[in-house]
Amino acid sequence: MSFLQSTDGKDSLLVLTFTYKDGDGDLGLNQSDTLSPFNPVIDSVGKSLNPFYQNLHINYLEKYQGLFQAVTNPFNAADTLTYAFRFESLTPDGRHKSIRGDIEVKISPNAYPNAADTTLYELYIYDRALHKSNVVQSPVVIWNK
């Protein structure tokens, strides 16, 4: 994981890199994968309600009274702060489908007022068989405020 900050101090970018390994290579989705169970079901504020449409999920947690907890979205009190992404199919050509590698995700950190100075990120993915991966955590991030 790395953190990139612009020279003017206004724009920041957190780069989360994680390693994956899959025995049958069914990670990622094709652009044509938009029918059930991968169809986008969107709520009134534009968030996807179908966890399989976006196959990479990152939960934002802040340290509060010594424990890391999900944070309520300040712009939508019925939601927590999460990031969701859809990545392309990683299935290799050929007979052997086992794969491993790294995925790099760039996100804007602390994108809301009153963000805590100590955070971490939990992430997981869904494969095309709808299996959820292990949930992995980033190292603790301590922000300079």
Image (cartoon, rainbow, N blue to C red):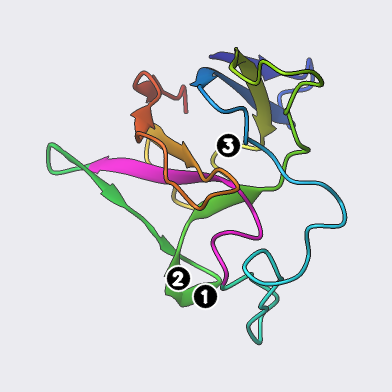
Marks 2/3: CA–CA distance: 17 Å
Marks 2/1: CA–CA distance: 6 Å
Note whether residue 89 is visible. Answer: yes
Would residue 34 appear left or right of 3 to someone viewing this image?
right
Which one is earlier in the sequence, the residue at label 2 or at label 3? 2
Image-quadrant location for residue 109: top right
Note whether residue 112 is visible. Answer: no
Q: Which mark is residue 117?
A: none
- The residue that disc 3 covers is 109
**Numbered range of the magenta stretch:** 50-63
Would residue 123 appear left or right of 24 to someone viewing this image?
left
- The residue that disc 1 covers is 76
Residue 51: % across, % down: 54, 61
Residue 45: % across, % down: 66, 80
Image-quadrant location for residue 88: top right
> What's the residue at 45%, 37% (across, down)?
123
Residue placed most toward the observer, 55 or 111: 55
Disc number lying in front (2 or 3): 2
> What's the residue at 60%, 48% (across, down)?
128
